Amino acid sequence: MVTIKKDHFSIGQICDSGQCFRLEKLAEKEGVEEKERYALTALGRYLEIKQAADEISFFCTQEEFDQIWKSYFDLEEDYGRIIGLIDREDSYLAKAASYGSGIRILKQDLWEMIISFIVSQQNNLRRIRKCISFLCSRYGEEKQTPSGIRYYDFPKPDALAAAPLEELYACNLGYRSRYIHNTAVSVFEGEIDLEALKTMDYESAKEELLRLCGVGVKVAECICLFGLHKTEAFPIDTHINKVLCRQYPGGFPFEKYGRYAGTLQQYIFYYDLMEK
DNA sequence: CATCAGGCGAGAC
DNA sequence: GTCTCGCCTGAT
């Protein structure tokens, strides 16, 4: 187990911010004042995390933490500094950032983000999680931790490309079934090169992602932000759009925040989501 | 029963 | 290029 103290880190806020669909809160033990425990399945691994007021514990070795999770949770970035960039006159943004100050932009797997955000469109968080969990259990490799916990890896492109369209429809993915099928085939056949995408700048990567079936501007921005860590990407969905109209009738000041616009978008998204 | 949820693609113009 | 419309499913 690795325990750290870290400002601007709340696993609960990260969980609720809806950027990661395979991070979930574990049921609390009855009667005991148990700290909050979460389970994450990512990068082919399974990790449990426990958080107290100012301490976060990762149930893994120091080596795994240093090599994998430190980067995954973007722990090298100074989020206090990013929040400090906010215009003092912008009380709305300051309040949103303060409210969600424990959020971090996770460095998630590109392929998983492509499929996950295709699933997310015109959909709610609960069903998104359900759909993805079902895809993993049906098409992902079953694995086991040293302590015997079973979990499923996210399905690889070849596994999803091999799934018949009717079978995907049977997973209750709705019209997104066709998008997933076509996208999986595109990637499996090498029409879109995931490794090449990782070397591209934001604009080029976004343009390339838009070639995938079921990936429009909004989904491409989400993939850039969470799957390629292009923190200048600013996904505009129906909620963010309403906030922009209400709070920024003259337009959001992108020029002011440059490559941190996407991080700020997450504070706004989370604030708007939770304050309802 | 209607509406909506973290949009997108296809077709019309 | 911009606009409209239909789309799977499940929750409210």
Image (cartoon, coloured by chain):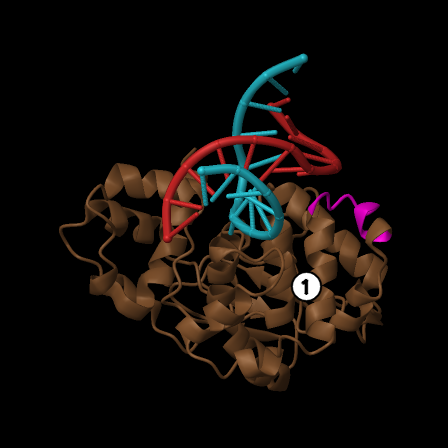
Chain colours: A brown, B cyan, C red
- In this rendering, the answer to whether A49 lies above or below C6 is below
Of helix, strand and loop, which one carries label 1? helix
- In this rendering, the answer to whether A194 lies above or below A128 is below
Residue shown at the point (34%, 58%) measured from the top left: A264
Please give the residue where the numbered disc 1 appears in the rendered image. A183
The amino acid beneath tag 1 is: Thr
Q: Is residue C6 left or right of residue A72?
A: right
Magenta stretch: give its range. Answer: A167-175
Residue A44 visible to the viewer: no
Q: Nearer the viewer, residue A202 or A154?
A: A202
Report if residue A231 lies within the magenta region. Answer: no
- In this rendering, the answer to whether B13 lies above or below A90 is above
Residue shown at the point (58%, 85%) measured from the top left: A67
Residue shown at the point (71%, 61%) measured from the top left: A182
Residue A255 visible to the viewer: yes
Residue A241 image offset from top left, x and y in percent: 37, 43
Residue A128 image offset from top left, x and y in percent: 65, 47
Label 1 marks a residue whose chain is: A
Q: Is residue A61 left or right of residue A93?
A: right
Q: Specify the quadrant of the image occupied by residue A161.
A: bottom right
Report if residue A173 lies within the magenta region. Answer: yes
Residue B4 image offset from top left, x and y in percent: 52, 30
Residue shown at the point (30%, 43%) measured from the top left: A244
Q: Residues within 10 Å of mark 1 (few under 14, many from 20)?
A: many
